[in-house]
Image: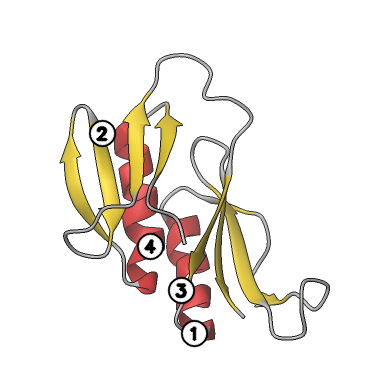
Amino acid sequence: MYDHIGLKVKNLDASVRFYTAALAPLGYVLCSHDESGAGFGPKGEPALWLYPHKGDAGAGAHIAFRAPDHAAIRTFHSAGATAGGRDNGAAGPRADYSPTYFAAFLIDPDGNNVEAVCA
C-alpha cells in the first residue's frame, strides 16, 4: 500500500541486523547498505529505508508488514527477538482487531513497533 518509509536509527548496524533477521521470513531482503543508510524490500525494490540519526529518533513509529502465513509470523517474531528486538506481542490471533487477524509485534532497536500480520 505504501511506496516507501524512512526511519531514523541511532545504530545503523544494529538496525540492519534486526531487520535482516526479522524480515527474511516475510520474503524481504537487504537491497542497499552503505554509511548513508540501508534499504529493505523485495529483491531490487527497497521500500523501507533506515537512516543514521545522531539525535533523538522521536517517539517511534508503527510499521506493519504483510506476511504470507502464520508460520512466517512466528519466525519473524523469533528471528527478530534473537537479533535484538524486544517482544511486544507474541504471534497469535487478535480477535479484537478482526476474527481472522493474526500478528506478532516487536520493538526494534530504536523503539519502533514493528508488526507482521496476515488477516
Q: Residues within 10 Å of mark 1 (few under 14, many from 20)?
A: some
Q: Earlier in the sequence, mark 1 or mark 4?
A: 4
Are the residues flagged by discs 2 and 4 in contact, CB closer than 8 Å? Answer: no
* Mark 3 or 4, closer to the camera: 4
| Picture quadrant of residue 68 | bottom left
Relative to 119, is 50 on the left or the right? left
Q: Secondary structure at mark 2?
A: strand
Q: Secondary structure at mark 3?
A: helix
Q: Look at 47% across and 14% down and name the residue there.
A: 55
Task: Where is residue 104? Give x, y as percent.
Answer: 61, 67
Disc number for residue 117: none
Name the amino acid type tagged 1.
Asp
Where is mark 2, residue-wise?
Answer: 37
Are the residues flagged by discs 2 and 1 in contact, CB closer than 8 Å? Answer: no
Where is mark 1, residue-wise?
Answer: 69
Cα–Cα gap, marks 1 and 4: 13 Å
